[in-house]
Amino acid sequence: MRRVRGFLTAAALTCIALVPYAGSAAENSYAASVVTLLSRPPPAMRFGAPLEADLLLRLNDLRVTKRLPVLRDRPTLKLAARAHSLRMLRDNFFAHKDPSQGQVGDRVAAVDRVGLYRTVGENLAQISPALPDLGPRMHRGWVQSPGHYRNMINRDYDHVGIGCVRYRDATACTQVFGGLAAELAKPVPLVMRRNQSVLLQPNFADLTYDGWQLVDSRGRRRAHSATRHFQSQLGLHGDYQLQVLGAKRVSARRQIISNFFGPAVILE
């Protein structure tokens, strides 16, 4: 009898041209490393598109039985999922935080250049050896695990991307869930140089634009503005995350300000 080794773990939290980046600021950038890995995956590793499609179908069938809206397949979330499955098999680890300190939100920010998110989440699974019924096995394992199941039926999510990678006798799959608040009219460049700028025009449904801010890896605000022009900031270099603010007036004297995380940017 063959022994089947399996792992599961869960965490709650527009395609781009994948071009490897080089340069002083990008050399130690987690976001650049994600893009480079996707553009040049290890030759021995293969994406499992049929398995990804099977898991998406099973996930949405589950949500239909729970009278929940189906999750829309978002290509950039699939890229984030594939990147993590690749990295787990390549670097021989199994966790939501990889050895480079990146987490699910960092991976989404690296590849989605227009998305503004309320929240993201992630389910992981790894099975060895590769069996013909991997889809049912992985889906059943996630459903039977309370943490994974909560992600799968979470009403706050409206999009998903599933990325599966096969290497030797192991298969790793990642589900990345997203609650999308809005999209920007123009993509934000991954690398921004001095004096470079982009006009921010989010398509909020019931909010008004209230500005932007840049936060560092510790979540500290390093720059902000109420204008619609986001531009590279003097004195700041390296990885940052762009956040866009939206305001909703609830009374004549009170409004609620929400911040939505968006693309990662590398300032040079």
Image (cartoon, rainbow, N blue to C red):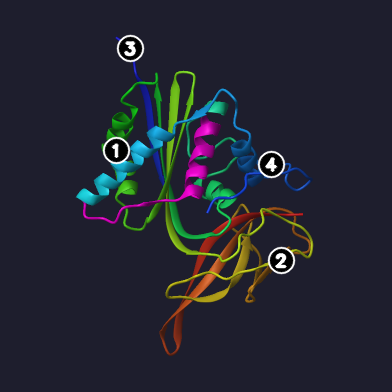
Mark 3: secondary structure: loop
Q: Residues within 10 Å of mark 4 (few under 14, many from 20)?
A: some
Report the Cα–Cα distance between label 3 and label 4.
Answer: 41 Å
Q: Earlier in the sequence, mark 3 or mark 4?
A: 3
Q: Is residue 237 above or below residue 148?
A: below
Q: Which label sits in the foreground, 3 or 2? A: 2
SS of the residue under disc 4? loop
Q: Is residue 198 above or below residue 152?
A: below
Distance, label 4 to label 1, CA atoms, is 37 Å
| Residue drawn at x 50%, y 46% as measured from the top left | 104
Q: Amino acid at mark 2?
A: Ser
Q: Which mark is residue 2?
A: 3
How many neighbours does mark 3 have within 10 angstroms: few (below 14), some (14-19), or many (20 or more)?
Answer: few
* Residue kind at label 1, given as amino acid type: Ser
Position of the C terminus by quadrant: bottom right
In the shown orientation, is residue 81 left or right of residue 110? left
Q: Amino acid at mark 3?
A: Arg
Residue 122 location in percent, x, y?
42, 44
Query: Please, what secondary structure does the residue beneath circle 2 have?
Result: strand
Quarter of the picture holding the N terminus? top left
Q: Nearer the viewer, mark 1 or mark 2?
A: 2
19 relative to 156, above or below: above
Which residues lie in the magenta part?
66-88
Q: Earlier in the sequence, mark 2 or mark 4?
A: 4
Q: Are marks 1 and 2 in contact (CB under 8 Å)?
A: no
Is 215 magenta? The answer is no
Q: State the mark number for residue 197.
A: 2
Q: Are marks 3 and 2 in contact (CB under 8 Å)?
A: no
**Would you say residue 85 sits in the magenta stretch?**
yes
